Amino acid sequence: LTHHQEECPALLMAVRMAVVACEEFGHLNTPDLHVMVEGSPCLADTIQGLSRARLANPPRYAYCLSDSLGHSKWRRGSKELKITARRIIDQEAFWSASDDEIMDIS
């Protein structure tokens, strides 16, 4: 929230995506973990802030603007995780909905 500066549905989704990625890969700010985000600028900004991934030096972040609900791809070596939003979430869904209710994870 400090990085993104507003609490919006995309921030909430980005945090949930980051938690899933963290459970899979551990620390999100390691230099060998790459992330690609497709969706709103808010989703991209929040994931970039949580992962500290940059476009350069070292490049481990990519972003594509899209009208979709958004998805993120996380990759370390040959291991890849794709997380796709199923629906927009609010504060209540953030705390109460299961990952499977709000995201496709593969």
Image: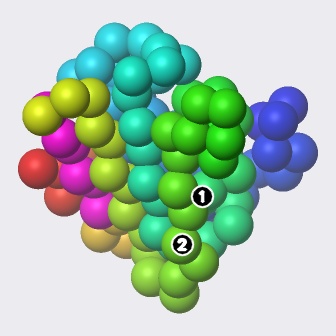
Viewer-proximal residue among 26 and 64: 64
Q: Is residue 81 magenta?
A: yes
Sequence-wise, the earlier of marks 1 and 2 is 1
Read off the residue under disc 1: 43
In the image as oriented, which residue stretches furthest toward the front? 57
Residue type, mark 2 in image: Cys
Q: Position of residue 3 (x, y in %)?
A: 82, 36
- Identify the residue position indicated by label 2 in the image: 64
At x 43%, y 44%, the residue is 35
Q: Are marks 1 and 2 in contact (CB under 8 Å)?
A: no
Which region is colored magenta?
A: 79-84
Q: Is residue 85 in view?
A: yes
User: Quarter of the image holding residue 57?
Assistant: top right
* Foreground label between 1 and 2: 2
Gap between marks 1 and 2 measured at Cα: 11 Å
The structure residue drawn at horizontal position 11% and vertical position 50%, both measured from the top left corner, is 106
Q: Give the class, few, some or many, for how many residues have Cα within 10 Å of label 2's Cα (few <14, many ≥20).
A: few
For the stretch drawn in magenta, the main secondary structure is strand
